[in-house]
Image (spheres, grey):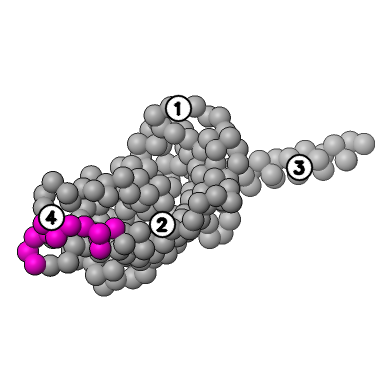
Amino acid sequence: MRKITKVFSFITVFMLVGTFVFAISIETIYKNIKAMSLKYTPDHYVVRVYNDKFEEALKDLPPDVLIGGKKPEVVIVFNRGKGVKIEIRNIKEEYKNLFSMYEEYFKFSGISKVQNPSEFKDIMDAGVLSVYKEDNSTVVVKAYDPEKKEKKDDYALFYLDKKMWIIKKAIYYIDGTPYVESINSYKKIGKYYLPYKIVLNPLTGEGEKEVFYFKDYKF
């Protein structure tokens, strides 16, 4: 009986030590995100965004709101420390923010949380972020709304690639049920590593899939 007790004690200690050694902390995740963002994300960029709904809406704009004799186009403007803004170019100033509500889509995807690490840090500092699971290539963090600070059944899971420290996937839960997921694709552009596609998939059987393409980066 004493031998069996020793064996179980050894197994318990081994599991605890293993957990301590291999579990990554939120602080380390943030440091990795920050380091890779500084290396692979420019301080500023503008990129054209293509989406079926955008393209249809642009066709319906009245000619008198257009300027410069050019076709209107939707762009993302990124600035380190400020994050992303979406605007329409080649259009009168008062109309350029018509699609500003879509800025939440890009924050929602998690892309801006790693390109602009201060957003990730805000959630971390609010105490609503924790490590959910980890394997050799991916770490998943669980985040609650930093404004509500309520750890209930509404939350998000962000899947981080441990090589480049970008968010490959985000799943949002409402009342504990998966609501929508974002699949994010990146590629090397010059010396940077930047998104080229976001796919938003509704997981409730309602709504339609949304696809956003990023093309023609300007630094």
In the rendered image, which residue does mark 2 sit on? 166
In the picture, the disc for residue 10 is 3
At a point 43% along the width and 55% down the height, the residue shown is 167
In the rendered image, which residue does mark 4 sit on? 65
**Which structural element holds mark 1?**
loop
Q: Disc 1 residue type? A: Lys
**Which structural element holds mark 2?**
loop
**Which structural element holds mark 3?**
helix
Q: Badge 2 local density, few (<14 within 10 Å), some, or many (20+)?
A: many
Boundaries of the magenta span: 57-69
**Which structural element holds mark 4?**
helix
At a point 28% along the width and 68% down the height, the residue shown is 215
Q: Tell me which numbered mark, 2 or 1, is placed earlier along the sequence.
A: 1
Q: Is 54 on the left-hand or right-hand side of 172?
A: left
Membership of 58 in magenta stretch:
yes
Measured along the vertical axis of the image, is residue 39 above or below residue 128? below
Image coordinates for residue 71, horizontal then vertical, percent: 17, 66
Q: Disc 3 residue type? A: Phe
Between tags 3 and 4, which lies in front? Answer: 4
Q: Tell me which numbered mark, 1 or 4, is placed earlier along the sequence.
A: 4
Q: Badge 4 local density, few (<14 within 10 Å), some, or many (20+)?
A: some
Measured along the vertical axis of the image, is residue 64 above or below residue 204? below
Give whichever of 203, 131 is nearer the camera.
Answer: 203
Q: Tell me which numbered mark, 2 or 4, is placed earlier along the sequence.
A: 4
Image coordinates for residue 165, horizontal then vertical, percent: 41, 56
Give whichever of 17, 65 is nearer the camera.
Answer: 65
Q: Disc 2 residue type? A: Ile
Q: Distance of mark 2 from mark 3, alpha carbons?
A: 38 Å
